Image: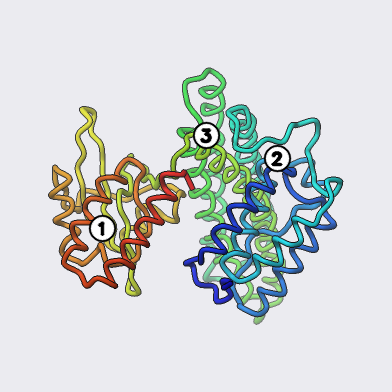
């Protein structure tokens, strides 16, 4: 019986069946293994990672972090590791290790019953936790910005960064103050029941993106300060100040993003549908296909009367408008796009390319059936073997979307 050992993202039948069965088994045992066996699992992945060179998912959480983290966060971390194992040829070893653990080596949480599937009350728990984590991150950014502004006045700065460094400290301050104001309103609206989890998630993700953008500028700036310190040691204190601030902020961001991701996963499972890719103005990815040269995407926007309009965007536009999958970001102006008023017209935009024969990346849950019909029509004139291969890939995607994966 074959195994996926190449890192190919198309799992064979054994891998798919084993992965699904292992997910069910894990959810029945507990939230995650205890630290000892979880570390053994991680060491298995490290061995495989050294062989294939592919970056690993997040590492196991420590015991202290396990008790402090939302329970769903622990399971998300474990499932990410299992999925990586399936994709890169380590699933059989991971399956054997996890199934061999006795009940005492599974973390059950503190008086929280283990259940298969995500419950609404988990979302209700994760929602305020995510808001609190992002708020703490914003407060930390404000504190770091204040400290930078105060201490930079007494430090020597290279000529090229003499204005840039203080200006960036002010930017960090402004982003943090703005985020804290939005988060205060968001918390009040959530407690009053005016916003649901999906709406909160969207706002949190946009705040994450804005603050991470400011942090990225700080990290980039530290590189210039490091070069200056190499030629003028008097600039070293400024470099140390900035790089240490960036390091502390990065740790805070990682905590906030883990909490936000846990909420995203829980919200998706409660909805029972696949996550949507949403831009800041409400436009969504309807259909995305990929090829070696990039991706081709059909986006849609629903009006107040329920009518949809569609536009086609390129690989570069898709990244700028939507970022990574299920990570909505502030979108630039859409007015330059050519919008059409019907589904048929939207497909004509896509039909300038053989999109149905390309790699199926994403389909919006509400458009699965319409895309399925469109794919079938466009594969009729394609050679039998190629059409069957393409149709199978589309069906795998349709099943994942329908199942909410």
Question: Which residue is disc 2 drawn over?
Answer: 71
Closer-to-camera residue (306/254): 306
SS type, badge 2: helix
Q: Is residue 393 left or right of residue 206?
A: left
Instruction: Give the mark nearer the N terminus: 1 vs 3.
Output: 3
Q: Around disc 3, counting alpha carbons within 10 Å, would you say few (fewer than 14), some (14 to 19), or many (20 or more)? A: some
Question: Which residue is disc 1 drawn over?
Answer: 313
Closer-to-camera residue (11/311): 11
Comparing labels 1 and 3, the label whose residue is closer to the camera: 3
Closer-to-camera residue (33/160): 33
Residue 149 appears in the figure: no
Closer-to-camera residue (127/221): 127
SS type, badge 1: strand
Figure check: 83 above or below 26: below
- Pinpoint residue 199: horizontal percent, then vertical percent: 45, 33
SS type, badge 3: helix
At x 74%, y 62%, the residue is 96
Q: Is residue 59 left or right of residue 340?
A: right
Instruction: Give the mark nearer the N terminus: 1 vs 2.
Output: 2
Q: CA distance from mark 1 to mark 3?
A: 31 Å
Question: Which residue is disc 3 drawn over?
Answer: 270
Q: Around disc 2, counting alpha carbons within 10 Å, would you say few (fewer than 14), some (14 to 19), or many (20 or more)? A: many
- Pinpoint residue 276: horizontal percent, then vertical percent: 40, 44
Instruction: Give the mark nearer the N terminus: 2 vs 3.
Output: 2
Q: Are marks 1 and 3 in contact (CB under 8 Å)?
A: no
Comparing labels 2 and 3, the label whose residue is closer to the camera: 3
- Pinpoint residue 311: horizontal percent, then vertical percent: 21, 51
């Amino acid at each position: 019986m074959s195994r996926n050992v190449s890192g190919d993202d198309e799992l064979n039948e054994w891998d798919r069946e084993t992965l699904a069965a292992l997910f069910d088994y894990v959810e029945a045992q507990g939230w995650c293994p205890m630290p000892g066996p979880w570390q053994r699992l991680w060491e298995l992945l490290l061995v495989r990672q050294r062989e294939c060179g592919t970056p690993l998912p997040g590492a196991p959480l420590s015991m202290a972090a396990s008790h402090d983290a939302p329970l769903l966060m622990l399971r998300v971390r474990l499932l990410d590791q299992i999925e990586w194992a399936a994709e890169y040829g380590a699933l059989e070893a991971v399956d054997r290790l996890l199934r061999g653990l006795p009940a005492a080596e599974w973390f059950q949480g503190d008086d929280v019953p283990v259940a298969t599937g995500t419950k609404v009350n988990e979302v209700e728990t994760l929602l305020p936790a995510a808001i609190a984590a992002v708020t703490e991150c914003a407060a930390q950014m404000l504190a770091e910005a204040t400290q930078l502004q105060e201490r930079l006045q007494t430090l020597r700065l290279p000529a090229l960064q003499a204005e840039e460094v203080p200006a960036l400290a002010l930017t960090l301050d402004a982003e943090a103050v703005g985020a804290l104001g939005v988060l205060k309103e968001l918390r009040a609206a959530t407690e009053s029941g005016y916003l649901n989890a999906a709406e909160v998630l969207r706002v949190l993700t946009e705040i994450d993106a804005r603050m991470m953008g400011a942090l990225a500028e700080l990290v980039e700036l530290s590189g210039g300060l490091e070069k200056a310190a190499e030629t003028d040691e008097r600039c070293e204190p400024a470099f140390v100040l900035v790089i240490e601030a960036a390091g502390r902020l990065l740790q805070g961001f990682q905590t906030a993003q883990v909490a936000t991701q846990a909420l995203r996963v829980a919200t998706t499972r409660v909805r029972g549908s696949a996550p949507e890719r949403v831009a800041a103005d409400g436009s969504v990815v309807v259909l995305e296909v990929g090829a070696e040269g990039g991706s081709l995407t059909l986006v849609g926007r629903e009006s107040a009367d329920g009518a949809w309009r569609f536009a086609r965007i390129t690989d570069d536009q898709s990244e700028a408008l939507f970022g990574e999958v299920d990570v909505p970001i502030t979108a630039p102006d859409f007015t330059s796009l050519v919008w059409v008023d019907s589904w048929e017209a939207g497909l004509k935009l896509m039909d300038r390319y053989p999109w149905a024969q390309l790699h199926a990346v994403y389909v919006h849950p509400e458009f699965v059936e319409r895309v399925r019909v469109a794919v079938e029509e466009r594969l009729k004139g394609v050679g039998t073997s190629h059409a069957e291969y393409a149709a199978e890939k589309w069906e795998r995607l349709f099943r994942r979307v329908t199942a909410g994966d």
